[in-house]
Amino acid sequence: MLEQEPGRYLITQRSKTASLPLLWEFPGGRVHEGEDDRAALARELEERLGLDVIVGEQAMSTHHEYPNYDVDFRVFSCRLARPGQQVSHAVVNDHRWVTLSEMGEFEFPDADARTLAKLLDLDQ
């Protein structure tokens, strides 16, 4: 989870043409074969959002089965490498910096919602 300031995390809204359109999600992406999870996350955030980040430790992981595919979801603590960076909307519809408690106001795909539920439980 990319933290901008203490307790505020980045979520992005999927594009209108994406699968699961306009739902909110934790930004990330796929790991290429032979690629380290941390390197993949840094690459995906740069490619998708134009953000240079420092990826820290893994905070948690979960597995979710959709009807046609499975997702191994790993959450890492991240921070911006340079303050003041702006989120590009080239491949996302929108973004927000929100607290964990505010995330309940947004509709997430099942895998993200399951991860959020775990995070909220960890946060209590």
Image (cartoon, grey):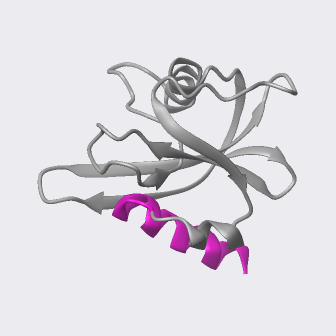
Quadrant position of residue 29: top left
Q: Judge whether 99 appears above or below 34 on screen.
A: below
Residue 44 appears left or right of 7? left
Q: Judge whether 119 appears above or below 22 on screen.
A: below
* Quadrant assignment for the C terminus: bottom right
Quadrant position of residue 15: top left
How many numbered tags mark residues here?
0
Give the x, y percent position of residue 94: 56, 41
**Mostly what secondary structure, the magenta segment?**
helix
Q: Residue, x 45% and y 59% (percent of image)? A: 112
Q: Does the magenta segment cover residue 122?
A: yes
Residue at the extreme left of the image, as rendered: 68
Name the residue nearer the viewer: 113 or 71: 113
Quadrant position of residue 119: bottom right
The span shown in magenta is 108-124
Give the x, y percent position of residue 118: 54, 71
Q: Residue, x 17% and y 49% (percent of image)? A: 69
Q: Residue, x 58% and y 71% (percent of image)? A: 105
Name the residue nearer the viewer: 117 or 21: 21
Give the x, y percent position of residue 93: 49, 38
Q: Residue, x 70% and y 20% (percent of image)? A: 52
Q: Does the magenta segment cover residue 99?
A: no
Residue 11 appears left or right of 40? right
